[in-house]
Image (cartoon, grey):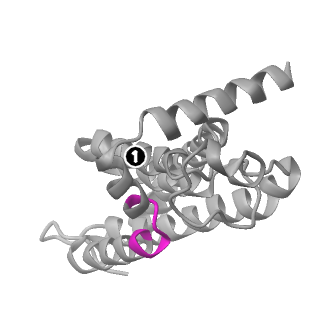
């Protein structure tokens, strides 16, 4: 059964990486999956939310950082050594697929990019419901980019996405409970605003 699933994963990987690739994905996917781009985008978003947001939003940024720490550390330092699955770019013949970025030395299962992206998408999507589908869509593109650039199987993406989604839900509820406690201790001002902490 496991061998069948592994073979199916390889087949889907090659279909996406080779046959679904085109001139647009060759440009967009390496950019979307770039650690530098993602870190810069996260930093800018965090600064804007801290600057323009209310008290709940500022606390949400703190929980966002906590979510990122949990998803990244769980994926990279716990689950990857546990599964010890080689990346496709470590095992498949180099002429059988398209490697658009550096392969990396780590294991494949789960994808940290998918875990981190979905952790943030679910956390902020639950907090800002109008943006939820945009955020989930962006997370899906980031996750899919790992297959397009040749460094992860679809199974890695699915497990990483599940880890991220569960972490996002858990941290959103933790944030909500925290805000209830804070607002009991520091209720809204008479002007309708919230005292900043």
- At x 87%, y 51%, the residue is 82
Is residue 138 shown in magenta? no
The picture places residue 152, in percent across and down from the top left corner, at: 63, 48
Query: Hey, which residue is sitting farthest left in the picture?
Result: 191
Q: Nearer the viewer, residue 66 or 39?
A: 39
Q: Split into 4 quadrants, where in the image is the N terminus?
A: top right
Label 1 sits on a secondary structure element that is helix
Q: Is residue 17 left or right of residue 90?
A: left
The picture places residue 185, in percent across and down from the top left corner, at: 43, 70
Is residue 34 shown in magenta? yes
The picture places residue 28, in percent across and down from the top left corner, at: 33, 55
Q: Which residue is mark 1?
A: 141
Q: Which residues are magenta?
A: 32-38
| Number of marks in the rendered image | 1
Q: Nearer the viewer, residue 157 or 147?
A: 147
- At x 46%, y 60%, the residue is 33
- At x 63%, y 42%, the residue is 96
For the stretch drawn in magenta, the main secondary structure is helix
Q: Residues within 10 Å of mark 1 (few under 14, many from 20)?
A: some
- At x 68%, y 32%, the residue is 10
The picture places residue 192, in percent across and down from the top left corner, at: 15, 66
Q: Is residue 96 left or right of residue 15?
A: right
Vertically, is 37 above or below 128? below
Q: Split into 4 quadrants, where in the image is the C terminus?
A: bottom left
């Amino acid at each position: 059964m496991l061998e069948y699933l592994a073979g199916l994963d390889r087949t889907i990987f090659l279909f996406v990486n080779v046959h679904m690739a085109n001139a647009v994905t060759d440009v967009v996917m390496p950019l979307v999956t770039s650690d530098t781009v993602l870190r810069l985008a996260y930093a800018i978003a965090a600064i804007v939310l801290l600057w323009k947001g209310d008290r709940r939003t500022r606390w949400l940024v703190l929980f966002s950082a906590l979510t990122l720490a949990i998803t990244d550390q769980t994926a990279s330092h716990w689950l990857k050594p546990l599964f010890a699955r080689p990346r496709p770019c470590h095992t498949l013949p180099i002429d059988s697929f398209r490697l658009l970025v550096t392969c990396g030395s780590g294991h494949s299962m789960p994808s940290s990019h998918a875990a981190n992206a979905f952790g943030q998408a679910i956390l902020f999507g639950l907090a800002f419901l109008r943006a939820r589908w945009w955020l989930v869509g962006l997370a899906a593109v980031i996750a899919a980019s790992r297959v397009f650039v040749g460094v992860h199987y679809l199974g890695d993406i699915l497990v990483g996405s599940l880890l991220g989604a569960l972490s996002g839900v858990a941290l959103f509820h933790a944030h909500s409970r925290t805000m209830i406690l804070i607002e009991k201790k520091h209720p809204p001002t008479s002007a309708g605003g919230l005292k900043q902490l």
